[in-house]
Amino acid sequence: MAEFGGQMAADSLLTHLLRDAGVAIGGGCLCLAGDCPHCLATVDGVSYVRTCQVTFREGAAVTLHAANGQLPPLESPGERPPVTARTTHCDIVVIGQGPAGRVAATDARSVGAHVVTLDAREGQDVIGVYPGPLVVARTEDGMRHVYPRGEIVVATGASEIQPAVPGNHLRGLVTARAAAELAASGVPLGQVVAVGTPPDGIVCELASGTLVRFEPSSDPTRVGAVVMRDPGGVETRLACDTVSLGLGLTPRDALLRMARGMNVRGVGDVLLPAHVPPCPVEGTVCPCAGVTVADLASVHARGFHELELVKRATLAGTGPCQGAGCVPHIRAFLAAQGAALQPPFTARPVTRQLTIGEVAAGAHHAVTPRTALHEEHVGLGAIMERLGGWWRPWHYGDVDAEYSAVRTGVSICDVSTLGKMQVSGPGALALLEHLYPVPISTLAPGRARYVFLLDERGYVIDDGMVARESDTRFNLTFTSGGATFAEMWVRDWAESLGADVRLMNQTFSLGAINVTGPRAAELLARAGVGAPPAFLHHGQADVAGVPCRIYRLSFTGEVSFELHHAAADSVRLWHALLSLGQDLGIRPHGLKALLKLRLEKGHLIVGQDTDFDSSLRRLGCEWAVRLDKPAFIGRQAVLRTNRLPLDRQLCGFEMDGEQTTSEVVCRTPAEGATIWDGEDLAGVVTSTTWSPTLGKSIMLGWLRLKDGQLPTDVTIDGRTARRVPTPFYDPEGRRARG
């Protein structure tokens, strides 16, 4: 047993490894306080465990991390029970149970407050403070979520400064506090040399002067001497087995910094002014990322003079210790270059590495993303629904008016949820030729083409557009619900083919607004676009002052322009379009109207009108595949299945409304309704709506062939439906082309 802060604590895993197991812990200065990366190990399949802060347990599987920060080869730990999350509400939470933390907790309890204390030494490692406020801690029993009604008291103390000189990677270096704790735990230290403040209760040789470097012993991985320099420049070499380093303290205040603006206060050593060490001259500054003094000098010479920029340019401070070891030295380095002493960089949760199970503990639902226009839709009274993995406006209260605005005037729709990817590089064209079943090389810059993605079996997995910007740059769109899989599909094939391409997912960074209707071009002209792209063309232009790539295509059957723009500009563009189109009767339309509009044009929806074995032949889309292409994904499967008799096909159906004495009553069959051919089960309806323009019910559905023929009349919901060609509306496509 070892005594910490007046309390008895069981052996840590690190103490056991050093004293009883004789394990050679990886090099670097050990702090025994969770502030350094030098005692990290994979324990029972979980990596980045600080062995100084977990209790020794017989039978634990321990693999030390390499000194260069690389993880060891891992074996599966087997089935793991789910991580639980326990929620606690209290008056005050005190983080840290050293002397100052214990006093703060006692004082709060003395006035009747409900106090929760959390301390890493007791297996309660606080990993972040979030708005709410919410304090999240990892414990041996799972995650703990603490919601204090009052204040958060941070009593996490101060960490000891790590050395930044040549040789600081050697074993046998310990902080002064760690030296005292190791000695009290029975770990043999041998001959100890103390640099700076000496450790309590240990016989040691005091080194004077400036620390220059550490030198190895006969074992090249372990310290054998420390070299000091006096004011006159004379170096002295002190032989040793262990070096105790009391180089000063820096407040362990990451939780204080991330909780700014909340009801938080610090007590004890966490409020100490940070000790600034001498400017490092040579050696490793950040052992987590292997950043050296030479690296700092290099980025500084290239203009990176701010601490936040140096962090990003070198990755110093982004590793397991989150800057605890390197930030004091980087601040000293930058100050020595003539700049004012800079504060530590912004602290953000999490302060410790977590497993996916720990991150997900307590979560019971999937996060549904929102577009940048979500609040605009809500403000307009939209009924929001989850569709395609997003929150989207179902309607704004008057579906008929939304539909009419598209067919007779002008309307806008938020289509930001479309999957969007840019493919560029010398291998872009070859990759896309392999992915798509139609030629891409014939697509001129400024042109766009509707395409399907096929799998190796020749079945449809997604659809969208390919738009060519230049010889080596293309923009792709995918369905909202299929975008994630499509991205994975493109990336996997790019890697397997060794394609020299750059792939950038722009789904979340780009917003998209569709301007559609007979007066869409008039609205764009008011917004400053007098010559918009022709049908299936695209181009760059400012729309109401917002830079956009304008795609001329149509899902509604009317003139349509998709305006792709930076998501940060979505609200500004949305407001401008609504304002400019007021006298045109502009109004936004939601998905309910859009699905009606698209069905009138016979446009299918992948995943609704398609199935797991939907081929382009079965979909009636053989025009979308060119078998004279020498190679594309699914080509051989298409050739093989084309030789088989067609068994079923996606077809269009129409059904008249029922006439009563005063009006036409529309009873449109539901999606999923059964299609009957006499007494035979013939298929299923996949999409259905009442068409105000056509005055009848229209449907898409799968229909089986009978004796090699498709029946003309079928029965749906007990009424006759006629098989008809699609599109139902404007079959020549004159309206979309303007």
Image (spheres, helix red, strand yellow):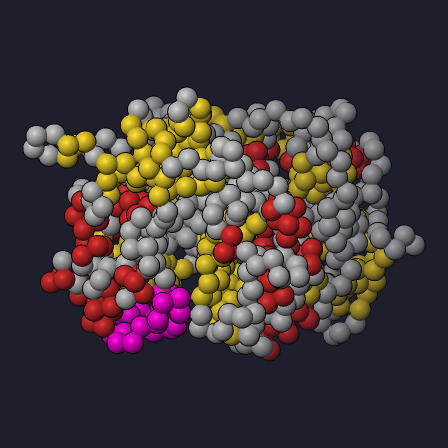
**Which residue sits furthest top?**
679
Q: Is residue 542 magenta?
A: yes
Q: Position of residue 715 (x, y in %)?
A: 34, 28
Residue 91 x, y percent position in the rendering: 35, 29
Residue 500 part of the magenta-drawn span: no
Quadrant location of the C terminus in the rendered image: bottom left
The image quadrant that residue 434 belongs to is: bottom right
Q: Quadrant of residue 98?
A: top right
252 and 512: which is toward the camera: 512
**Residue 619 percent coordinates (x, y):** 48, 45
Tell me the magenta residue range.
528-552
Figure quadrant of the N terminus: top right
- Residue displayed at 35% across by 71% down: 534
Residue found at x 28% / y 44%: 596
Q: Position of residue 668 (x, y in %)?
A: 26, 33
**How many numbered marks have been drawn onto this rendered protein structure?**
0
Say whether residue 100 is visible: no
Rendered residue at 60%/38% (across/down)? 355
Q: Is residue 242 left or right of residue 107?
A: right
Viewer-proximal residue among 233 and 324:
324
Q: Is residue 730 above or below residue 350?
A: below
Q: Is residue 509 above or below residue 533?
A: above
Residue in the picture at 63% in, 45% down: 643
